[in-house]
Amino acid sequence: MAVGEVMRMEIPAGGDLTVTTPELHVLAVDDSIVDRKVIERLLRISSCKVTTVESGTRALQYLGLDGGKGASNLKEVNLIVTDYSMPGLTGYDLLKKIKESSAFREVPVVIMSSENILPRIEECLKEGAEEFLLKPVKLADVKRIKQLIMRNEAEECKTLSHSNKRKLQEDCDTSSSSSSHDDSSVNDTPSSKRMKSESENLSSLF
Amino acid sequence: MNTTVVAQLQRQFQDYIVSLYQQGFLDSQFSELRKLQDEGSPDFVSEVVSLFFDDCSKLINTMSRSLEQPDNVDFKQLDSGVHQLKGSSSSVGARRVKNVCISFKECCDVQNREGCLRCLQQVDYEYKMLKTKLQDLFNLEQQILQAGGTIPQVDIN
């Protein structure tokens, strides 16, 4: 779009101009087929896109963190929910590997367990788990987690737009003092482009 | 739609499901699962419990084999099986099955083979009993739907 061009929006016939927030994509990890089915349904009913895998190893493969070919095909995941007690890689092991990765360390990880063991909970939270859910998981638990994640994302949006606003303010101040020189690209960039680059920055976080 | 027939079936359904809760076959997690069922996913509960019963059958077979040789019982594998069974029964609200698993685990912990055999038998009995009960419940649901009615929401809290 050129400077000064007005952005026209096509309003669909019927007139409903609802802005829908993009769906959260959740990776759910559990070795129990019953629990996978339940968590999948809980998440779907909460309007999340869901991918389920049966082990920590498969989770790492999916994320491209297993050092294999998948590494070049990074998936976009907004939340990882994993069982603690799994054969092979435990949920804790998986949590550690995720937090060690540069690609996925910002992705919130929620641990689920049927056992209410305080040292275990503390260990997971210390390693960076967002929350620890006691099984059996209920709809209220999933709703709460989703709200938490959405709120965190909204906070990040605000922080980003505030820091952009401040920058814009600074640039305005500097350019008004000079005569004809058009300063930074920020003044020239139509707002639509700026918003797009903000969301691009956001998605690169995940 | 014969409203009397529908009302009767709904009543029957209500009484039956309440009795299952009262007799301890089911707990609140089962009603949590029912909340997740809707027109878009009308068979969710029966699908989950079906997976659960398959799981039971498989785990019981494995555990039975672990217990076969009196002087060579793999209690570690047994414990793992019980843990899995306890987990999935808890996830579907199969209260009696879950409770047997708790006793089963205690027998594993002290390496009590006789106790484990008894628990295995009990868990087999309980899951099959629940399977029959739930089949009856789902049949009632089908009858209600076929008669043009809706399945009642039952609040057990």
Image (cartoon, grey):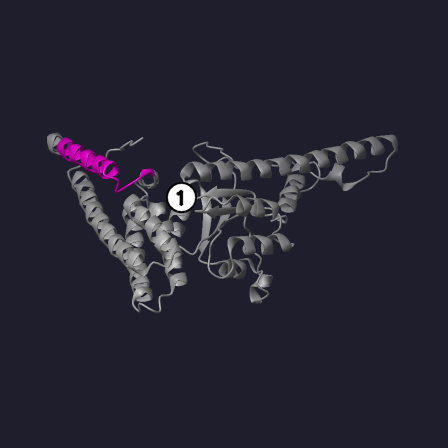
Is B27 within the magenta? Answer: yes
What SS does tag 1 mark? Answer: loop
Mostly what secondary structure, the magenta segment? helix
Is B72 within the magenta? Answer: no
Q: Position of residue B32 (x, y in %)?
A: 35, 39
Q: Nearer the viewer, residue A170 or A62?
A: A62
**In the figure, is residue B38 to the left or right of A64?**
left
Tell me if I can see residue B54 in this picture. no
Is residue A176 placed above or below A40 in the rendered structure? above
Tell me if I can see residue A52 in this picture. yes
State the residue at coordinates (28%, 41%). Answer: B26
Q: Position of residue A137 (x, y in %)?
A: 42, 42
Q: Position of residue B76 (x, y in %)?
A: 41, 62
Q: Range of the magenta residues?
A: B6-28
Residue beneath label 1, please? A136
Q: Position of residue A186 (x, y in %)?
A: 75, 39
State the residue at coordinates (67%, 40%). Answer: A194
Label 1 neighbour load within 10 Å: few <14, some 14-19, many 20+ = many
